[in-house]
Image (spheres, rainbow, N blue to C red):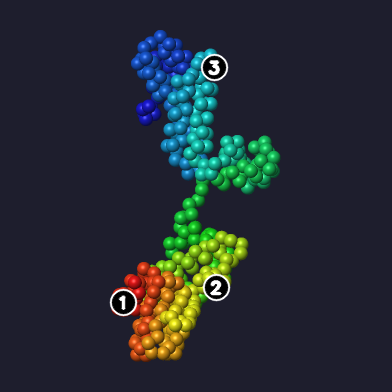
């Protein structure tokens, strides 16, 4: 549709006699080709444009661009021209209904920040207009009773309309509120995400207190100090594989404790068979080699539990005695454990006692060979 707002005339017809122009347009359209009908439609629209623009000027509300309102009015006029039927009565009355309806639809669909029911949207606009009219007539701010009487509603509907009107144009939270760069958002508090984690943090703190000191230190170094497993292993004198195993066991226990109503026993507590301690059981020889059965992981923290009882047996053994260290129950042996085996081997050599190790698991055997203890290994 052309943006030209200059009205056109047909056969000297007065510009405002839209009803007669519409009747002639409808009569001529029914007896012409499709292209001619389009030209007649465009001419009728141009003739009625001033009426649509006048209606648009009546609905200039707030900060809504007047051009948008005028375009909505013209769209309503186009619909009125295309749908007009002389059997419906006056074209002017029909066009006014179409144009104002399209303008109101524009305000309802495009200018309200918050979705509000159509009845309350229209009532809010009516209340706004009544406020302005009464203020001009009374030369003061009208009371709620006066506004409700002008609009023909009760106080509750008036309050609902005013509340709905607050959603007409939202205010940006990034709106500046001072010269220092502060924004409206800075005045609002924020949800503290840590609040939802308080219960879990208190529970975890209690569970951490149940852990052995070594496991607590490993967790602190890994998740607070952000050390790698290799760095933790070097600091504690363990192997990286042992650190990985301890981490997995500790985290698994914490996870199970958090997801259950009762705290499960710690795998390192005295109740289970493998309590993390080194246990040495001496089986006298009685004419056969003395056997020492070793159970548990051997690391820097508990290597002394292996050193003292084994060296004690070596010191008490007569020269020529044969001793067998059964390491089948040792799943892990770190540098401190290797140091114990070297000390036992040297002490036995000095006293003339033969010490061999048997039952080593693959990982432990590999470590012992790397340390040069091949002479102690059986098989």
**Residue at the spot 45% in from the left edge and 76% down from the top edge:** 294
**Occupied quadrant, residue 329:** bottom left
Left or right of 19, for residue 368: left
Give the mark nearest the N terminus, 3 or 2: 3
Q: Quadrant of residue 261?
A: bottom right
Q: Which residue is mark 3?
A: 88
* Residue count near mark 3 (Cα–Cα under 10 Å), binned few <14, some 14–19, many ≥20: few
| 2 vs 1, front mark | 1
Q: Nearer the viewer, residue 215 or 67?
A: 215
Give the percent coordinates (x, y) of residue 369. Answer: 31, 74
Q: Earlier in the sequence, mark 2 or mark 1?
A: 2
Residue underneath mark 2: 269
Mark 3 near mark 2, Cβ–Cβ under 8 Å? no
Find the residue positioned furthest to the front: 287
The quadrant of the picture occupied by the N terminus is top left
Q: What residue did someone put label 1 on?
A: 374
Single out the mark in the foreground, 3 or 2: 2
Earlier sequence position, callout 1 versus callout 3: 3
Mark yes or no: residue 226 visible: no
Report crowding for label 2: few under 14, some 14 to 19, many 20 or more residues within 10 A (C-alpha). some
The residue positioned 65% from the left and 42% from the top of the image is 158
The label nearer to you, 1 versus 3, is 1
């Amino acid at each position: 549709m052309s943006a030209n707002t200059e009205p056109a005339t047909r056969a000297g017809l007065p510009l405002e006699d839209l009803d007669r122009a519409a009747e002639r347009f409808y009569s001529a359209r029914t007896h012409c080709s499709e292209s001619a009908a389009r030209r007649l439609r465009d001419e009728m629209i141009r003739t009625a444009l001033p009426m649509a623009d006048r209606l648009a000027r009546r609905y200039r509300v707030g900060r809504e661009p007047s051009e948008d309102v005028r375009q909505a009015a013209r769209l309503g006029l186009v619909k009125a021209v295309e749908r007009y039927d002389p059997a419906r009565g006056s074209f002017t009355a029909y066009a006014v209904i179409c144009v104002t309806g399209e303008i109101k639809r524009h305000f309802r669909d495009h200018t309200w920040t918050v979705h509000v029911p159509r009845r309350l949207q229209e009532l809010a606009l009516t209340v706004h207009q009544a406020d302005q009219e009464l203020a001009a007539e009374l030369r003061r701010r009208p009371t709620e009773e006066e506004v409700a009487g002008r609009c023909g509603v009760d106080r509750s509907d008036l309050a609902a309309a005013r509340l709905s009107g607050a959603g007409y144009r939202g205010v940006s939270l990034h709106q500046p509120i001072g010269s220092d760069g502060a924004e409206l958002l800075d005045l609002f508090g924020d949800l503290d995400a840590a609040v939802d984690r308080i219960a879990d943090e208190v529970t975890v703190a209690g569970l951490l207190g149940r852990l052995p000191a070594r496991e607590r230190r490993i967790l602190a170094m890994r998740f607070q100090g952000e050390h790698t497993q290799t760095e933790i292993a070097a600091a504690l004198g363990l192997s990286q594989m042992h650190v990985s195993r301890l981490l997995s066991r500790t985290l698994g226990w914490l996870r199970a404790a958090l997801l259950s109503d009762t705290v499960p026993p710690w795998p390192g507590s005295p109740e289970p068979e493998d309590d993390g301690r080194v246990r040495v059981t001496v089986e006298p020889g009685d004419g056969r080699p003395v056997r020492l059965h070793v159970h548990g992981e051997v690391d820097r923290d508990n290597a002394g539990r292996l050193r003292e009882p084994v060296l004690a047996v070596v010191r008490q053994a007569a020269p020529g005695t044969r001793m067998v260290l059964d390491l089948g129950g040792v799943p892990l042996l770190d540098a401190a454990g290797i140091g114990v085996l070297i000390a036992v081997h040297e002490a036995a050599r000095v006293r003339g006692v033969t010490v061999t190790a048997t039952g080593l698991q693959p990982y432990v055997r590999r470590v012992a060979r790397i340390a040069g203890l091949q002479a102690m290994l059986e098989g």
